[in-house]
Amino acid sequence: MKRILLILILFPVLAIAQQLQSPNGSFELQFQVENGVPTYQLDYNEETIVAKSSLGFELKDMESLLSGFTLKGEKTSSFDETWEPVWGEVGSIRNQYNELLVLLEQESTQRFLNIRFRLFDDGLGFRYEFPEQPNLSYFIISEEKTQFAMTGDHIAFWIPGDYDTQEYNYTTSKLSEVSSLMEQAITPNASQTPSSKTGVQTALMLKSNTGTYINLHEAALIEYAAMHLDVDASNFTLTSHLTPDAVGNKGYMQAPRNTPWRTIIASKNAGDILLSNITLNLNEPTTYEDTSWIKPVKYIGVWWEMITGKSSWAYTDIPSVKLGETDYSNTEPNGRHAANTEHVKSYIDFAAQHGFEQVLVEGWNQGWEDWFGKSKDYVFDFLTPYPDFDVIELREYAKSKNVKLMMHHETSGSVRNYERYMDKAYQFMVDNNYNSVKSGYVGDIIPRGEYHYGQWAVNHYLYAVKKAAAYKIMVNAHEAVRPTGLSRTYPNLIGNESARGTEYEAFGGNNPDHTTILPFTRLIGGPMDYTPGIFEPDVSKYNPQNNSWVNTTIARQLALYVTMYSPLQMAADLPETYNKHLDAFQFIKDVALDWEESLVLEAEPGDFITYARKEKGSNHWFVGRTNDEEPRTSKIAFDFLDKDKKYIATIYADAKDAHYKKNPKAYTIKKYRVSDSSKLSQYCAPGGGYAISIFEVTDNSQLKGVKRL
Amino acid sequence: MKRILLILILFPVLAIAQQLQSPNGSFELQFQVENGVPTYQLDYNEETIVAKSSLGFELKDMESLLSGFTLKGEKTSSFDETWEPVWGEVGSIRNQYNELLVLLEQESTQRFLNIRFRLFDDGLGFRYEFPEQPNLSYFIISEEKTQFAMTGDHIAFWIPGDYDTQEYNYTTSKLSEVSSLMEQAITPNASQTPSSKTGVQTALMLKSNTGTYINLHEAALIEYAAMHLDVDASNFTLTSHLTPDAVGNKGYMQAPRNTPWRTIIASKNAGDILLSNITLNLNEPTTYEDTSWIKPVKYIGVWWEMITGKSSWAYTDIPSVKLGETDYSNTEPNGRHAANTEHVKSYIDFAAQHGFEQVLVEGWNQGWEDWFGKSKDYVFDFLTPYPDFDVIELREYAKSKNVKLMMHHETSGSVRNYERYMDKAYQFMVDNNYNSVKSGYVGDIIPRGEYHYGQWAVNHYLYAVKKAAAYKIMVNAHEAVRPTGLSRTYPNLIGNESARGTEYEAFGGNNPDHTTILPFTRLIGGPMDYTPGIFEPDVSKYNPQNNSWVNTTIARQLALYVTMYSPLQMAADLPETYNKHLDAFQFIKDVALDWEESLVLEAEPGDFITYARKEKGSNHWFVGRTNDEEPRTSKIAFDFLDKDKKYIATIYADAKDAHYKKNPKAYTIKKYRVSDSSKLSQYCAPGGGYAISIFEVTDNSQLKGVKRL
């Protein structure tokens, strides 16, 4: 009798591990409260991916939520549903997981904390939940202390943790080398605040020496600060580090509520990381009743000529202006203002001629003379054009050509100002036939002291997207927080930049392997408006004062339309340059924006990625390969094609002597008959790649003169 | 020859004093650049009021604008114009001054700074002007360094400098005692940030030992941080100390622009300080074309019962709510919610019965359960009523009684949230027949780190007023920055609290001499919504848990309608209490809100003030006396009345044994015949006073039974 009693009494005190398996059993999660501390561990095919890691929070002026917990209860459940995204890399997405919800109580304070784990066949998502309770209502997070204990000195593809920018080149190094390489990794930016000497951003891509790929990110970042990770080189543990606000607090919370999900994707196959739908699946379904107004967009724009310095955003060279006071009709134009009526018309013509839906125009509105670096509050009104930009005339001209203009709302980080004008600005768009806006947040956030990735700004970005939906407007927010799958819930968020994009090619260049990493990092949470399509890598051809070089071959630029998934794709270069390479340009015209299927044929982060994608609603396939600075040979099979069908593949590839620096414009275009049994061995130049459009043969005459691959 | 040359060469180096006289010669200003430092001095009737004081700025990351100046030029001019305010203490205001504009250049940086001085017959105003110039465009102020060198250890009537509140009792002390008394002067507040150990707020009232009254304040505070003053007890010099932002900067500036005016009013007669129009005259005329919708308002309100704790703003006692998620129809009402339809109707009835135009209702809208102290962002939506407040029914009921409801927008300091809802909130008002709103900013400002009186919040308050004008809405902003005469330019700003008001009588009491100081300080810049009219000083009568005492006699409460000028006046107590004293209440019903003439019959800051005011558009006069904690006898003459006219004066006075604590409700009401030769000697109790309404006799039968005074 006594022995039984003994066991019963000890029962709640013993550490009991809760276990959860993924649907196919490949992943196993263990949860355990150990010495009062909540911990979890994740194994993948019996390899430990995340060693025992602790969970919890430091709170301001309150006892922390780090220890003193007991497990009060747990619930498990399963879920399996398939849903269709409004736009995406695939036509339908399966959301299948096993779930474990643990209910914890901190005895000394009688406070409750729940943690929900969802285990998918490709990884784990978990979040904290603060239920409604008497002893925890309003609280402030000083720091979230979620650990991800890596099991070795993995290779990491990282950018420095920063509260204001992600526009850094990636560094590839061991985790132990992060702190020694931090200083050189922090290159200048219009707005930057490094988070810590060992901080990195998410999505973080890792590769163990056992060949396991691991990816850490977050999903559903709503009303919360963005998470960075601090690297502890002594034990390879990564710990969450949230973005603070102006006074150093990291989260204002009111129970009941949840945190975002923390995600861990893992596979022996790098392509599985790219194809994972965990991030989207952890977001809520959309409640938009009508999504018919949300459509992918292919566009060109009055933009690259300003980025290179060939033209000017500003109408004049006055050193400073005051909206409503500066009389532009009385100022001297600088003669370099690109956003003028005639010039925009020429872009509309080009778009119409080549089937582009929209033309972005930057610099159309008053205020660009002193738009950044001045901490200027009332910097733009988003309504008043320069004297040489005729809103009505261009609206009608675009309409007549069945083209839309794309609006541009550069905010200069002056967020209160943008919100004051937002309704009027959106209505102005509707009144003038715009349905999509590229917004920007270049420069430090106003109110001063706030950061681009803090809770306050994160709240704002979503506010802008939700309000846009009321006007049936699609949003592409640059310099905003990197996405975390919110576009499932808010499908009018069709893009972000929020990483180092093509513009940096004109600001000194991106690493030639940059686009072989971005899909493993920045794109995990959502599409990127990378704005590829540069056919003239020598920037000095546009602006003799700018010696920057676009580190790419032309063939690789075409590939990016396939490898850098986005429902919003720009052909970024100037029409006059495209006119010199209309043969290569054809691929950009042909490539689809919305996909039924996506496959990763080859992938090694930092080295190369090859995607094959099938267009939604057709039998067309597109293949793209982006290649790093090494010359390589890509070997792919076309077994994704339908059996018993004939196709014509047009391969846009690097010439044998192509090189991103020495000979970027050397490309070949070859047509072949292909079928599901075809194979390709294709040379890829340093900083190169290839793009393939594959059309089903509908008429045998199309095959005439076309050789088999 | 040589001698002449010597003089010429030295000429620009010698300190040349620029002199300026006021129109009647009583004031003299001297301006001089001394050792490169701009200085000024102000004399009044040959007494130095402000000893030589320096001017300038510390700038962030830039050479300061403190020294190295030379005088490049100067211009003098005169101005004399009379204008009529939309509402005010007088029907017309003369704006007469002599002006000196000095043009300075800082040689080493080739930067220009102008200072404009306007000298009136009762004082000085001056401001800095940054002209458009090549070497100074955008700059950040670290600190303004304007000195006001007092000539002795004056008596000061002060409250602690604070970036977030003015709700302190006044301390009367010598300047040298300020720092030793600072700690006890800083009493608790929902939002407070003391500015410095020797800091005081403006308007600052001073009295020299030569019997000269001096008042320091600012006018036209627009797009700039509010100014406090730091006391240097070693030399009695006061130096400007601006309110910082979240990152410690004090002003974001873009040339060309001006600062607010710094004002110095002086007189041997305390009443002249009260009657000075310098602050209004330094503001710009209004550009509102139509001001017919702006009218003074006499109101009652569902308010004091919540302030005392008798009733609740909140509908329930749930500890925390989420707008849009909390289902109030499913919660248990606490039974103490005052803002319910039937109760508000009873107020509408009382207002209609007694001629009050409006009824303020606080607590009408969802969100009051956890409205402050939580740093809650989405705290109110300003649109959604509680289940027991029927917007439509009350709108129609009020209309039928020819009464309006007064809107209440408590923001809890969550400024971004208020701006997001502002248009909808103002439209809601228009749709429901409201034309005036009391707004509030209780609690720390969100965005966190900003202060109530920083440039950012100052910008917001004016934004709210300007936007309100577009909806023909009048604004009464509590907890906002104290006014600086802006209501000349924006006459729909009809009030602020922005000081320790009547509500503090229920939070522990105000000093009995509080209202003998406020007109010399808080009211210099504009009217105060002091909300007097308390007839039941024992707060425990309303709420047994609240032992607070309203430190006043009833007679003094009546006087405040005359001595505390405001176009917006509340009878703050409960109808059931007024019903017990309808005889005294008659004064409140009779007193005017808008004035043709105002005179100060007696005044000593901290001791007593007696005003006589003539109603605009009638021959009625009203007299009010507020008295400190000493028993005193007021002696006034009625020589302000028209000759050869007969009047009946009703005197509401303290009874002989009245006392603000021991016997506050003991008052007498006596009618007398008076004329311009009448005189009155009237006893005033401690914390007491008297009020007199004087009506012209239109029919001799009115004189029957009325004795001569």
Image: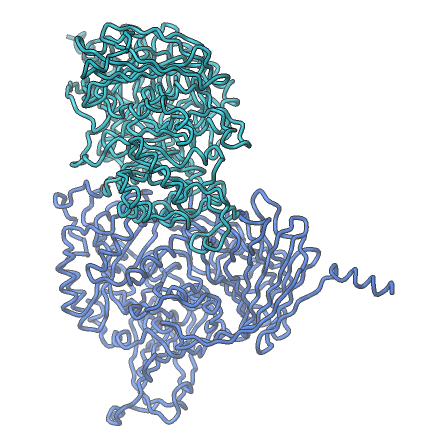
Chain colours: A cyan, B blue
Q: Position of residue B113 (x, y in %)?
A: 60, 56
User: Quarter holding the N terminus of chain A?
Assistant: top left
Quick one: B709 or A573, which is closer to the camera? A573
Quarter occupied by residue B121: bottom right
Q: Position of residue A205 (x, y in %)?
A: 37, 17
Q: Residue at x 57, y 47 (%)?
A: B59
Q: Is residue A661 visible?
A: yes
Vertical position of residue A703 compared to residue B551: above or below: above
Q: Nearer the viewer, residue B214 or A621?
A: A621
Q: Quadrant of the C terminus of chain A?
A: top left
Vertical side of B338 occupied by B688: above or below: below
Q: Count the numbered circles shown.
A: 0
Tell me if I can see residue A104 in this picture.
no
* Residue B319: x %, y % from top left: 23, 42
- Please tell me whether residue B479 is drawn above or below residue A194 in the rendered image: below
Q: Which x, y percent locates residue B422?
A: 29, 52
B583 left or right of A691?
A: left
Q: Residue at x 25, y 91 (%)?
A: B702
Q: Nearest the camera: A17 or A53?
A: A53
Taking depth in this image into account, of A20 and B557 the one nearest to the observer is: A20
Residue at 25 percent across and 22 percent down: it is A89
Name, please, the residue furthest toward the right.
Answer: B1
